[in-house]
Amino acid sequence: MRAEVVYHLARRDVVKFLRDRQNLVATLVRPLLWILAVGFGLRRAFDTGATGVDFVSFLVPGVATMAVLFSSMFSAISIVWDREFGFLKELLVAPVPRTTLVLAKMISASVTALVEVSVVLLVSPLLGARIDPLGALVAIPVLVAFGMSVSALGIAVASRMKTFEGFGGIVNFLIQPVFFFSGALYPLDGLPPALAAVVRLNPMSYAVDATRGLCVGVHHFPIALDAGVVLATLGVFGTLAVRSFARMQA
Amino acid sequence: MSPSPAIEVRDLSKRFGDVEAVRGVSFTVKEGEIFGFLGPNGAGKTTTIKMLCTLLAPTSGVLELAGFDVTKNPEDVRRSIGVIFQDPSLDDRLTAEENLELHAVVYGVPRAERRARLDEALAFVELSDRKKDLVRTFSGGMKRRLEIARGLVHRPRVLFLDEPTTGLDPQTRKATWEVLRGLRDQSGMTLFLTTHYMDEAENCDRIAVIDHGRIVAEDSPEALKRAVGKDVVFVRTNEPAALCALLAERYGLTPDRTEEGLCFRVEDGEAFVVQLVSEARVAVTGIAVRRPTLDDVFLALTGRQIRNGNGEAGRAAMRAMARRR
Ligand SMILES: Nc1ncnc2c1ncn2[C@@H]1O[C@H](COP(=O)(O)OP(=O)(O)OP(=O)(O)O)[C@@H](O)[C@H]1O
Ligand SMILES: [Mg+2]
């Protein structure tokens, strides 16, 4: 595997992400709207006493993880796009191992996710969130690993899809429950047992928990467990992505 | 001469559900050869190319490229080939230059040579002044030219070209052929191409004609034309009925009435014309003798005119017709 090839393939996605100005602005503003609308909207209803932090600060790590979830999943959509417009053939006949193509896609997905996360973490203090800068820095690798595993799942799905429409449907079907059952929007302590069970099965819960623990000092699981689950998820989905991609025909 | 042929195909078949796109095709392409694959729309040309370039798994058969088994060693095959696809394959949200650069990197063109190769390729297709523009702002022919340029950037051992010149203006078509022949002569590149332009097919060393997934003829253009045989004669006259009668009675011919006069086929056109003119009591106003062309070969072998050889317009019209049905 040649590093230069990975770099150029990943750069292609990032260049296109930065070039599409309208989309770029929309993606960067969307998480901030969540913080403004949901954060300030529900602040009064939130029992600060239970966690020791105000709701806006509590929400920011959840929104950052959400941004990673959405942007990584939608980075994988570019595979379906490439198939639709024919460029995928050019990649598939190239003398490059399929693993390289998958890795490049996962890297570009996490780079675009990182751009979004940085904006969330840099702007949210201006909105009144109290975030530990050092903790936020440590949370970034966790979010990158989470982003890569989400894009790997997206790649696995995209490799089996023939059309945009099909991919869009499946992705929405996957992404909504993952987001809502993750604790991005609410604390995990004292949940009804059924909900707690679902949340416990959701890998995103651990990414949110780690990020929240590191950024604002509130967490439900041990951070080491969080990191372990995120890495294991990356391993499983990464393998799945490589397998699905290798089987794909143009 | 290398011991293994550039391409070796035996009993290749491909089935898509109920459609048998390729049915037991066999052929060999020698190193450094220009091999043309001709056939009507839907004959199985693109399907065969996709199997040869590792994009499609064959239903059955043996495929070897540069000595590598295509199904077992796809990576080795990919290192030996280049493909100019029939369908669009550019990233139109990148610039022309970015498309070529990514290709050069992916195909391992050494960094030191990259700049020169890109400039050379862009200059050849006359897109140097547009290299910083997004491909989506290009005309159809410009995109095609860019794809051809890209196919030449990494100088593969075997280059596949699926209808490379469709949609190109005559100057570019001519220039493209000069470059292709040059590549073969200088670097011994093997070219495997499909085309619906019979004048282009004349450039091939060997031609295989495929119809309904089967190869119906395979030889040099000259030999194929010889096999079709007879010369085509056109005679103009003011009294076509009388001449028709004469040709039928005296020589047993049944001429067709065409815009260029009466048309028929005989073994030795010139000798026949000399004899006819000296004997005929009918005033002849014009004569033309034509050797069989590849068009005649194509027609004789597939029983069809070249369908929709003029590209996009024809294809769109056919799609519209299919929709109306
Ligand atoms: N992916 C596919 N799924 C189903 N059928 C296919 C597929 N690809 C090709 N075919 C069918 O296989 C047959 C051969 O198609 P192919 O594209 O090889 O023709 P071709 O010789 O390249 O024609 P053209 O001159 O129009 O490019 C056609 O009947 C086509 O409909
Ligand atoms: Mg074709």
Image (tube, rainbow, N blue to C red):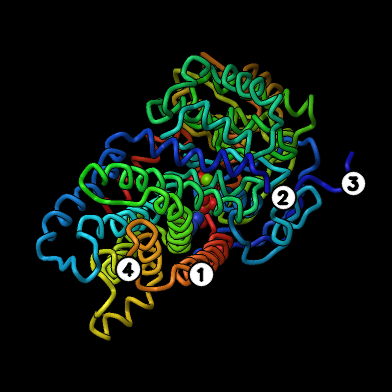
Instruction: Name the residue that disc number 3 marks.
Output: B3
Residue B213 percent coordinates (x, y): 59, 56
The answer for how far apart the CA atoms under marks 2 and 1 are is 40 Å
Is the distance from the Cβ of mark 2 to the nearest ligand 1 atom less than 8 Å? no
Ranked by sequence position, the earlier of labels 3 and 2 is: 3
Relative to A233, does residue A124 appear above or below in the rendering?
above
Three-letter amino acid code at disc 1? Gly
Q: Secondary structure at mark 3?
A: loop
Mark on residue A228?
1
Mark on residue A178?
4
Three-letter amino acid code at disc 4? Val
Q: Chain of mark 3?
A: B
| Viewer can see residue B228 | no
For the residue pair B111 and A81, the one nearer the viewer reads as: B111
Q: Which residue is painted at 36% across and 66% down in the image?
A: A209
Nearer the observer: mark 3 or 2; the answer is 2
Q: Secondary structure at mark 1?
A: helix
Three-letter amino acid code at disc 3? Pro
Nearer the observer: mark 1 or 3; the answer is 1
For the residue pair B91 and A47, the one nearer the viewer reads as: A47
Instruction: Name the residue that disc number 2 marks.
Output: B77
Do discs 1 and 3 belong to a common subunit? no
Q: Which residue is painted at 66% across and 39% down in the image?
A: B107
Q: Chain of mark 1?
A: A
Q: Which quadrant of the structure image shows residue B201? A: top right
